[in-house]
Amino acid sequence: MTKPVLLITRKLPAAIEARAQRDYDARLNPMDEPWFRSGAEIARRATEAKADGILIAAGDPLNAETIAALPASVKGIATFSVGYDHIDVKAAKARGITIMNTPEVLSFATAETAMTLMLMAARRAGEGERMVRAGKWEGWAPTQLMGVTLEGKKLGILGMGRIGRELANMARGFRMEIHYRDINRLPPEAELGATYYGDDDSFLAAIDVISMHVPGGDATRKWLNAERLAKMKKGSLVVNSGRGGSVDDAALVNALSSGHIRAAGLDVYDGEPVVFPGYFGLENVALLPHLGSATIEVRDAMGNRALENLDALLVHGKAPPHAVG
Ligand code: DGY
């Protein structure tokens, strides 16, 4: 039987590329050449290969224009990510193209990244590391680089989905109080004593740390703006490991510069890989390069999940387990 043609836009873990080559006529990008940044080039390669499916990754521009340019042979697009704000799902649906993602397998790792950022912001870890590397550390001092503890602080989780709930479990180990804002309240067995807020104002006024776990897109665009930052207590911490577009960068830079926000930790950026330049001059912001799901174990699990979805659709002609939209 002829194998379905699968265009893969990014270099993937070795085991995933091997599995793809075993089961598909796979067109790889072994050097991770940056053609994936152009929607027109993705469509051109899909047309040239007569691709049945495409395996893309977070950030590949699968907007309406790219979707319109894809050949009729493409039946499904699997993204190597849980987020799919880089895909115009409506446009894909209109063309009968199934979109699939990789939920669940990365929840713990992404929560670990949020916890890392929270600790870095609270304990000034980035600043300390830079000091040591620059050879500027003169030895222990009673008042040096004093941060704040997380113990007893109110952690406000914006978006209490799978990642938010993993973070809540970790933060309980740090003796933090869990507060959350979401559209719907969780059932008591999932809430585990966390305090729910049905409106932004009372949520923002109550918490000491916000950790953002909302999807990207128009609905959350610049959600954390100057007005909402002003509603947070002076000295609060901000963490974002969701999507960069949900923070108004200029407003956060102002709040960090004035000290209204004590410190922040960011893993995601509006317009990645571009980072808002205002952050670079600030010591009180920890900046990570979108590491959320970047563990060896999770990247294999994401690849396997993406291929399970494609197998269902392209090899077995069945509904994929993780179709979106
Ligand atoms: C996702 O899966 O959406 C992440 O942001 C990529 O690590």
Image: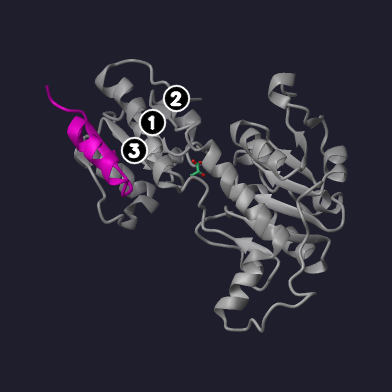
The residue singled out by tag 3 in the image is 55
Q: CA distance from mark 1 to mark 2?
A: 9 Å
Residue at coordinates 69% horizontally, 48% vertically from top-left? Answer: 222
Say which amino acid is labelled 2.
Answer: His
Dot label at residue 322: 2
Q: CA distance from mark 2 to mark 3?
A: 14 Å
Residue at coordinates 29% horizontally, 32% vertically from top-left? Answer: 53
Estimate how packed mark 1 is, as few (under 14), some (14 to 19) or many (20 or more) residues with alpha carbons within 10 Å: many
The residue singled out by tag 1 in the image is 305
Q: Position of residue 174 (x, y in %)?
A: 71, 45
**Quadrant of the image occupied by residue 161:** top right
Region rendered in magenta: 1-25
**Disc number lying in front (1 or 2):** 1
Looking at marks 1 and 3 on the same chain, the residue that comes earlier in the sequence is marked by 3
Q: Nearer the viewer, residue 325 or 170?
A: 170
Disc 3, SS: strand
Q: Position of residue 159 (x, y in %)?
A: 68, 35
Residue at coordinates 60% horizontally, 36% vertically from top-left? Answer: 163
Say which amino acid is labelled 3.
Answer: Leu
Q: Nearer the viewer, residue 283 or 319?
A: 283
Q: Is residue 187 above or below residue 291?
A: above
Badges 1 and 2: C-beta atoms under 8 Å apart?
Answer: yes
Looking at marks 1 and 2 on the same chain, the residue that comes earlier in the sequence is marked by 1
Disc 1, SS: helix
Q: Is 50 placed left or right of 255 in the picture?
A: left
Looking at the image, the residue that sits furthest to the top is 318
